[in-house]
Image (tube, grey):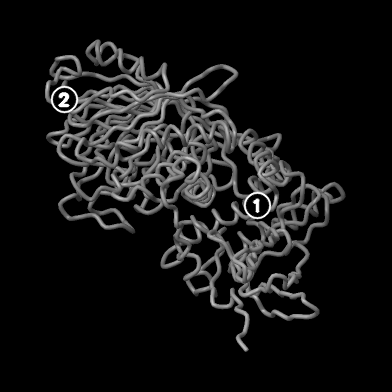
Amino acid sequence: MDISAVKTIFANSFRFMSRFAFVCILLFVAPFQSAMAQQLPTDRHTGKAVANGTRSVNGAPGNAYWQNKGDYDIDVNVNPVSCQLSGTVRIDYVNNSPDTLKTMLFKLYPNLYKGSSMRNTQIATADLSNGVQVNSLTLDDRAIDSTQWRINGTNMYLRGSSVLPRQRVRIQISFAYSLNKGSFNRTGRITDGAYFIAYFFPRIAVYDDIDGWNEYPYLGKEEFYNDYGNFRVRITVPGTYQVWATGDLKNTAEVYEPAFAEKISQAERQDDVIDVITAEDLKRGRITKSQPTNSWQFEAINVTDFAFAVSNNYVWKAASLVVDPQTQRRTRVDAVYNPDHKTYESVVGYASKTVAQMSNHFPGLPFPYAHMTLVDGLDAMEYPMMVNMLPFADEKDIVEFTAHEIFHMLFPFYVGTNETKYSFMDEGWATMMEFLFHPLIAPTVNIDYDLSSVNEYAGLAEDVPIMTPTAQLYGKARYADKDLKPALALFYLREWLGEKRFTQAVQHYIRTWAGKHPTPYDFFASMNAGAGMNLNWYWKRWYFEKAIPDLAISSVSRKEAMYQVTVTSPGTAPVPIHLTAFYQDGTKQVLKRSAGIWADGRKKVVFTLKDTPRVDKISLGSAYDADIQPKNNSWIRPTK
């Protein structure tokens, strides 16, 4: 997005504009107007969506809003020894758009490992393959010749068949590929006898009202954007393996021996942690039905993706908790891990407390899924109802990554943001939970949160506005601009609005966009509506500008036993002021101003302190106050 080329030219309402003038202006600029608020600069596609009525200026879906849907019936065989995965996927796809789709776009995410694919992450030569082999494709039971599809990296284009507006079609694809034994990038072999398998099936890309087809290729660093659908998945593995997956296991009694099926049922009914599978159980065997293979059947309703883990040597701890007091609905929480990784023993407890915080504290809405399963893996990555998380050695990392990954169940899954294009829309929330939830779920574990990625890189040439599409983020400031800066912006906004008002605004946003695809502009306007106030100046300075946090104690003067302390803002990002005066007798006084103090454009704030008892030192900042120049954040009483 070229922010410098955008002009905000509308007044307070669209009502007095003629349709002709409105369309003409959109040819040059498309400002996004929040009700009763100044405007935010935006791109032409968003302005066109507002004009078409699919988006609105108040943060709610427009009257003409639509999104497409695909229901997936998947049947796969996984051979953990040969690393081969093969199967079929049947997709019942509905084109709810007003457009005729003359080309269909599919995603073949495993082609990240295809030798000829482009990548922005390292893959060892030994893990390169021929990619996904599409053995056959039918459209409404009509066989499609392979000359009609073209594979380019992780994108597959199907031409020669049109899908009309409101038309339903059925696509069936037979496919196969080799799982990666190394170079684990969100999917593949973890160790002998353990795999985490994600993005494994051909799927139809998102076609939306903003960009049309989501043609962003998957290069390795970026994440995902998928439509909602219902999944019925049958996974066949050797008889000694267990499977954990998105959705509900529908044939527990057919794959588990009765004693273990009962333990699972017990875990779903009680708060206490149960050892569903222990190291001793693994030695004895006979956990699953004694057959050459078992077929595990899962069902997930209205989710954006499906992932699963398989293992014959992982232990399993589980518990459950009430997430909806009105209905008494419970969520089961699982930790599935290598028994040699002792740090994973605490994961189920932190996970349960995180789900409880989400349901009862922030955002204070019932956790939306029936289970939350964390699997000992080689990454830190989220999938609907599933997390693949490293066995971190540091307890602090276990706490913070558990909170981070589980919070992703809300964003981008329950609320279907486009994390391929704007990853800050989910990473900002999840990163904020690392320090918001940490003292609540693990008060005895030291937090000492690291803000160095912002403090060291904000304002450098590599630093860009948060609104920069994620695919354009590279270099030193990438993490700061897509994760930590948006987390701090939300955290400071919470302090300004107060916990109650902030939570109300977030709840409004979630309820408005659950099961849908909001853009950043929908988020900004929805939060404005939920908070009941104009926050656009704040969004503009944090998200659309090169937000640089920098405060300074610029002067301290004494007059008649009083000190005047002037705090200035040389930076561009609105950050809170936390000023602490340390007195000779060992006491201290903290003076605060929220980030809202900068709303009127001021550049300085003056504080008054009594010099009784004597003030020895004044410091600026707190544990979560980012500042690129901390050297000007303190004053020490001069010695005579």
Q: Position of residue 589 (x, y in %)?
A: 66, 63
Left or right position of 73 against 41: left
Report helix, strand or loop for mark 2: helix
Q: Position of residue 12 (x, y in %)?
A: 83, 53
Which residue lies at the image location 57% right of the left edge and 17% below the top edge? 327
Earlier sequence position, callout 2 versus callout 1:
2
Q: Which residue is mark 1?
A: 495
On the image, the x and y values in percent for residue 607 come to 74, 69
Q: CA distance from mark 2 to mark 1?
A: 49 Å
Quadrant containing the N terminus in the rendered view:
bottom right
Q: Nearer the viewer, residue 604 or 203?
A: 604
| Residue 598 image point, x, y percent | 72, 64
Q: Nearer the viewer, residue 16 or 170?
A: 16
Q: Which residue is mark 2?
A: 280
131 left or right of 158 in image: left
Say above or below: 611 vs 398: below
**Along the line of sight, the residue nearer the viewer: 319 or 10:** 319
Q: Is residue 604 visible?
A: no
Is any atom of residue 249 visible in this view? yes
Q: Residue at x 62, y 75 (%)?
A: 616
Is 268 above or below relative to 537? above
Helix, strand or loop at mark 1: helix
**Which quadrant holds residue 147?**
top left
Q: Please, what is the three-letter code of the amino acid marked with disc 1? A: Glu
